[in-house]
Image: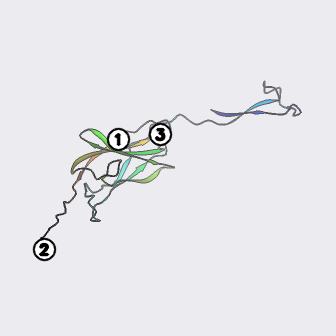
Amino acid sequence: MYAVRVRLPASVTDTASAKNPLPAQSRCVVFGALPDATTPTTPQLIAAPALALSPDGDQRSEVITWNVYVDASTTLLRLRIYRSGKAIWGKLVPVSQAGMYSVAWDGTDPAGRVVNNGGYAYTIEALNRAGGASTALRGAVEVSSAVHMVSLRRRQ
């Protein structure tokens, strides 16, 4: 329950004192109470993203984007990327109302370096205002950065 206590000057008179046991100088006003936080439903994938990511600067498959639908109890959308069972990257997206939201990963670690080639797991969860999480939407993505060969010729 959310309330504000207000101190009133002694000159203010109370016409409802029979209904309120507080002295006239001190009133508590209730603005409203939030209902208990409910566990959000699992985010629903709107369209399957590409399962391959190639963050090598060639402007093809540089970012993988998940478009998901979340319910009204969701306040944050959380994407986590894992390698060998260890979380290597994460992102929180604020949610203002039920609807579709996008969350993306560009194949880099928190320091901005391109991750190694290989398989990575992901989880997408909806979080409520109390921090409760939905069942995670899970999947996998393959990172495959092309190795650019440079040919060097000796001047003659």
* Nearer-N-terminus badge (2/3): 3
Secondary structure, mark 1, is loop
Q: Is residue 106 left or right of residue 73?
A: left
Marks 2 and 3: CB-CB under 8 Å?
no
Q: Which mark is residue 155?
A: 2
Secondary structure, mark 2, is loop
Instruction: Give the residue at mark 1.
Output: 136
- Name the one closer to the observer, 37 or 93: 93
Does 81 sit above or below residue 17? below
- Residue drawn at (23%, 50%) of the image: 116
Quarter of the picture holding the N terminus: top right
In this rendering, the label closer to the viewer, 2 or 1: 2
* Percent position of residue 147, x then y: 19, 60
Q: Which mark is residue 128?
A: 3
The local crowd at label 2, few if under 14, some if 14 to 19, many if 20 or more residues have their Cα within 10 Å, is: few
Quarter of the picture holding the C terminus: bottom left
Marks 1 and 3: CB-CB under 8 Å?
no
In this rendering, the label closer to the viewer, 2 or 3: 2
- Cα–Cα span, label 1 and label 3: 13 Å
Q: Could you tell me the amino acid type at mark 2? A: Arg
- Cα–Cα span, label 2 and label 1: 58 Å
- Cα–Cα span, label 2 and label 3: 65 Å
* Nearer-N-terminus badge (1/3): 3
The local crowd at label 1, few if under 14, some if 14 to 19, many if 20 or more residues have their Cα within 10 Å, is: some
- Dividing the picture into quarters, in which one does residue 21 lie? top right
The local crowd at label 3, few if under 14, some if 14 to 19, many if 20 or more residues have their Cα within 10 Å, is: many
- Residue drawn at (48%, 42%) of the image: 73
Marks 2 and 1: CB-CB under 8 Å?
no
